[in-house]
Amino acid sequence: MSNSEQSTVRVSLDTPGAVGSAPGMDVPVGYAQARSYWRGVFHRVLRDRVTIGCTLVLGLLVFLAIAAPVLPLIDPDVANSGDRLLPIGSPGHLLGTDELGRDMLSRLIHGARLSLLMGVGPVAVALLVGGVLGLTAGYLGGRTNMIIMRITDVFYAFPSILLAVAIAGALGAGITNALVAITIVFIPPITRVVESVTTQLRSMDFIDAARASGASTFSIIRTHILGNVLGPVLVYATVLVSVAIVIAAGLSFIGLGASPPEAEWGLMLNTLRQSIFLAPWISLLPGLMIFITSMCFNLISDGLRSAMDVRY
Amino acid sequence: MTAAAPHILSVQRLQKYFPVRSGLLGRASAWVQAVDDVSFEIAAGETLGVVGESGCGKSTTGRLLMRLIEPDAGQIRFEGKLVGRDLKVSDLRRSMQMVFQDSYASLNPRLAVADSIAFGPQTHGMPRERAIGRARELLGMVGLEPSQFERRYPHELSGGQRQRVNFARALALDPKLIILDEAVSALDKSVEAQVLNLLVELKKNLGLTYLFISHDLNVVQYVSDRVLVMYLGKVAEVGPVDAIYGAPQHPYTRALLDSRPSMDPEIRVEHPPLTGDPPNPINPPSGCRFRTRCPHAEAVCQTQEPDLRPAHGAPGHLVACHMRRAGSGHSQAAPLVRFGDREPSR
Amino acid sequence: MFQYILSRLLYTFPIAIGVSLIVFALVHLAPGDPLSAVMGEVDQTMIAEMRASFGYDKPLPLQYMTWLGSVASGELGYSLRSGQAVLEILLSAAANTIALGVLASLLGFSVGIAAGMFAGYRNGTWLDKVVSASAIAGVSMPHYWLAIVLVIVFSVEWGLLPAVGAGSASSMFSWESFQHMILPTIALSAIPCAIVARTTRACVMEILSMEFVEALRARGLSESRITLHVTRNALPTVLAVMGLQFANLLGGSILVETVFAWPGTGSVLNQAIFDRDIPVLQGTILLLAMFFVVTNLVIDILQTWADPRVSRH
């Protein structure tokens, strides 16, 4: 084995100059200001005009929805049989009136309260429940994973609209029931995404390194898993909000969910549908609001995805 | 290494079979015999090199020792204390640390390197301020200027720098033994050399013991005091580094050493010493697991599994081969009668 | 391959049982007695008699087993409202829904694949941007609203096409029926079209960036031959997405069917919900969910056939 003495490794190792404390010899990687991952994401989002635009639109909508009661708006519930279906741009009614003579602008703004709540609320709750289920299944693996994921699979056997309609239909009309239905619909997909990201992370060496340092499961999940799961899940949840808004309004549209005289976009779309021959363009306004809101969430999700460079 | 040195780690009959699950209920239909009946010792202050082809169970052995995977059978004693009975796994993990091959995957991408290093001490109750201070100190020890590196993220470092961070993290709990699982294998040759020298230096300064797992025979020769050769989950040969490299007793060890590229253009290897892939560890060959690729395989190799026995020559040199066991029935083995008096009874 | 199909079939079985359990549980979530909702204030003894005849007085697990047994033998019960056999109601409704679903798939998938391929090949150009923006709009679009927009434009404003119903023609293949199907088809195809376009675009872009395409170019293959390679590699993913979208069209058409008063499963479901017609409700949801399960199974098997990598594990 004498020739092995000649190998490159031996030669360079035997050179006393290259002792370990010479990191300058390593490939230097940019001396740019080190900054945290989330700050980097934030800066990239700031440079994305579409995402910023959508955020501003949604921000305005949320502001209007919250401030609706104190804004100088006409009472959304006051009907006026003399002013039915006034066209867009009528004096005193900027966006016209509905089939009972109620002010459209005021109803659309007040409608944002329920419609946004019914889109964001269920996803937020599903995020909590699905997050815990997915983390548990992904981190523990084995039998626990199998049980949780098989149950999830069963719920996946329903198209989301069908499941929402079926649950809301079974529970009966009403906002609470619709909220419950939409929440149940979104728990399985979130569980799946969280489980898949967690399972991937679980097999990475830094988790083993953390286990090897004697950390508890809870502290490993908090420090090492959550921060890595959050990005992809946030992106996904934003898409789900866009879907949830369409489904929630859809439930009200077919008479599940909100009920008259409440102002809610899907319900407004439904009642105005009877008037499409009389005032076609006014009847499209609530749907346009659903469309814009849903699209904003979708675009924001796209922006976040590229800012985080998420793949799943 | 002297024979009198106390064993810091002693492993007896370690075994791990992984189930191959299939079907609806995920029942085990077969078992991968990743680590099978592996025993060895490490003396305090030495470096034991573990070599073998990929899939031979050397990494699994490392993870079993850390209890990242639960062994099926076998005993691990750390400083004489039986792990699980006299020594809690959590305490074992403070005294024993591990560095992995993939420098990127072994660092949390969302944590600054100082936070990654400080995580271990913090979980053991060190206040954050002190843990970060300790992390800075450790960065300096592994040759990374703290002020320049502590707030960096893994993707902002080179492979060598990341691996230095991983050493710093392993050192953060003041371990006595560090398992280096292919820790320098993924690095460029020039960087590898620097990192190896750092390892040697740290070991000397901190009085560490290493279990050095690698497929690179040259590197193992350079860092190790003793070497253990694994083949398909079993120990083929173990002994002092000079004995293993100078007078290998097992045909597998010899083949491994012969397969190293020669630096002398005049010396050419006429035919590959080792052909094909190792057999499937799900159904390893009967008898000696190496027999399917061994040029000297005979009938006895198929029927009997060779056990680890002292080889002639250097003390502490053990080999599992019928050719080296007198009276085994192998045509190249010495007859039992003639050398029976020299054979220590076991 | 055969073994994979078999295991996939076996795997579908517990899912189907789970689905039936959910469907059964759903209607029992409902507050109140299913019969009193239908019958209103009538003689209590009569309700009790009816309960007994429908088996609603038995314990739930027993009711489930009885129901499952009859479902397995193709017996879905009778409508509480009309007394008609549920299976009979569903079969004619399903034919209408499937007709729309197939048409909407043909339209959505062909447009989606074409647009997606185009955008993928012309990555970064303004055409790509138009396709990507339309695709995002398509996914975000409340399709029931799109349905109303279509009715307003084509029926109310221009008077070109009928707004509601399926027409009175006896055959589904008549010109009158076809006219009635045009608007619902377009409304339903928006989402699958957008999703297929996005998937195809992403797939084509990813494949084009792979080294083997470069190798093919280096070997002097014509662009049309390379397109063939790209298509072959994109097929499994796009196929999976298309199958899922087709299944979604059938199960999720309730909203669009409501807008067009289309006599499909969605309308049956809608009616059953407001009538609290339990057997019809259970039957419809079960049928639609089972259709979804079976479609997924077929896609999986097709995917295995189209992608040699899948079959290996």
Image (cartoon, grey):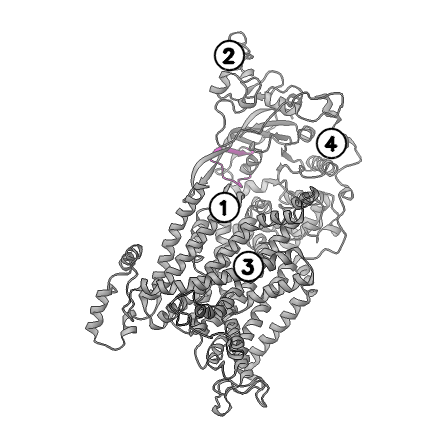
B180 relative to A174 in the view: left or right? right
The boundaries of the magenta stretch are B66-79
Chain designation of label 4: A
In the picture of the structure, the residue carrying the numbered disc 1 is C304
Q: Does B249 appear above or below A57?
A: above
Q: Are marks 2 and 4 on the same chain?
A: no
Q: Residue at x 53, y 59 (%)?
A: C109
* Camera-nearest residue between C99 and A232: C99
Tell me, for residue B327, which label it has, or none.
Answer: 2
Q: Nearer the viewer, mark 1 or mark 4?
A: 1
* Camera-nearest residue between A140 and B312: A140
Residue B80: horizontal and vertical position, in percent?
Answer: 54, 32
Q: Residue at x 26, y 65 (%)?
A: C56
Distance between the alpha carbons at the discs numbered 2 and 3 = 77 Å
Q: Is residue B118 visible?
A: no
Q: Residue furthest front?
A: C175
Q: Is residue A286 magenta?
A: no
Q: Nearer the viewer, mark 3 or mark 4?
A: 3
Residue B104: horizontal and vertical position, in percent?
Answer: 65, 46
Chain designation of label 2: B
In the picture of the structure, the residue carrying the numbered disc 3 is C110
